[in-house]
Amino acid sequence: MIKLQNIQKVYRTDTIETLALNGINLDIAKGEFLSIMGPSGCGKSTLLNIMGLLDMPSKGSINISDQTTNNLNDKQLAKFRNHKLGFIFQSYHLIGDLQVLDNVELPLLYRDTTAKERKRLATEALEKVGLSNRLKHFPKQLSGGQRQRVAIARAIVGNPEIILADEPTGNLDSAMGNEIMDILLQLNRNEGTTIVMVTHDESMAQKTHRLVRLFDGSQVQ
């Protein structure tokens, strides 16, 4: 499902060159749930952003769902992301002045989808995460765990093949974190969704199929 070959990422300023990723080779199978761990600043989020086509590598190739993405232009990349990938962030990234249902509908606005169909799909996604009774609420009216459930619903509303989750339980207490992890495990098991998750939590990582560790931009496990 995801194949990274010799990925290198270098950030340059006028005076400093920082090697963020160095020689990453990674194959992720369809339906796999992979976690990525490592100390702060080791390149985890950079790697996830490259997998999500939000950032481009300095060297190396990316193949996602049998599509080599290196030569796609910005418009093609945006369309590919919208149809193939779902994103979950540690800080939720919900729009405060939109109701829950409208937040979840957002990815569908970039598709040829009617308003009626968007509402149906968003409602179904919220039902999957147990928030069918919160459609008209605003993010500020929700707990942290509920906000993350909304973020998951937004990530899955377009039925992506891959979900990329950056510290999805990082801002939650252990009980809420376990609830969010259970939702991700169910999506992986029941829907066959391929999931890549960055985490600092060893107990969460141990629930996934495979663990990759990074250190100073290199893969060590």
Image (cartoon, grey):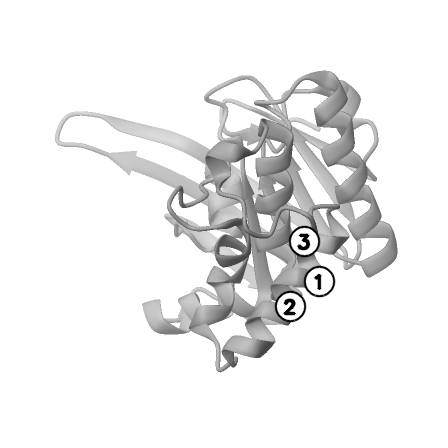
The answer to whether 5 is drawn above or below residue 122 in the figure is above
First along the sequence among labels 3 and 2: 2
Q: Nearer the viewer, residue 165 or 60?
A: 165
Q: Which amino acid is tagged 3? A: Leu
Q: Residue 10 in the image: x percent, y percent?
A: 34, 37
Q: Give the image quarter of residue 75.
A: bottom left
Tell me what residue is drawn at x 71 percent, y 25 percent.
Answer: 176
Label 3 Cα crowd, 10 Å radius (few <14 / some 14-19 / many 20+): many
- The answer to whether marks 2 and 1 mark residues whose Cβ atoms lie closer than 8 Å is yes
Tag count: 3
Q: Give the image quarter of residue 41.
A: top left
Q: Which residue is mark 1?
A: 124
Q: Tell me the SS state at disc 1.
A: helix
The answer to whether 85 is drawn above or below residue 201 in the figure is below
Q: Residue 199 in the image: x percent, y percent?
A: 63, 27
- The answer to whether marks 1 and 3 mark residues whose Cβ atoms lie closer than 8 Å is yes
Q: Tell me the SS state at disc 2.
A: helix
Q: Which mark is residue 121?
A: 2
Q: Tell me the SS state at disc 3.
A: helix
Residue 64 is at least partly visible in this image: no
Q: Which mark is residue 126?
A: 3
Q: Residue 141 in the image: x percent, y percent?
A: 52, 34
* CA–CA distance in space, label 3 to label 2: 9 Å
Label 2 Cα crowd, 10 Å radius (few <14 / some 14-19 / many 20+): many
Q: Nearer the viewer, residue 131 or 44?
A: 131
Q: Which amino acid is tagged 1? A: Glu
Q: Give the image quarter of residue 198.
A: top right
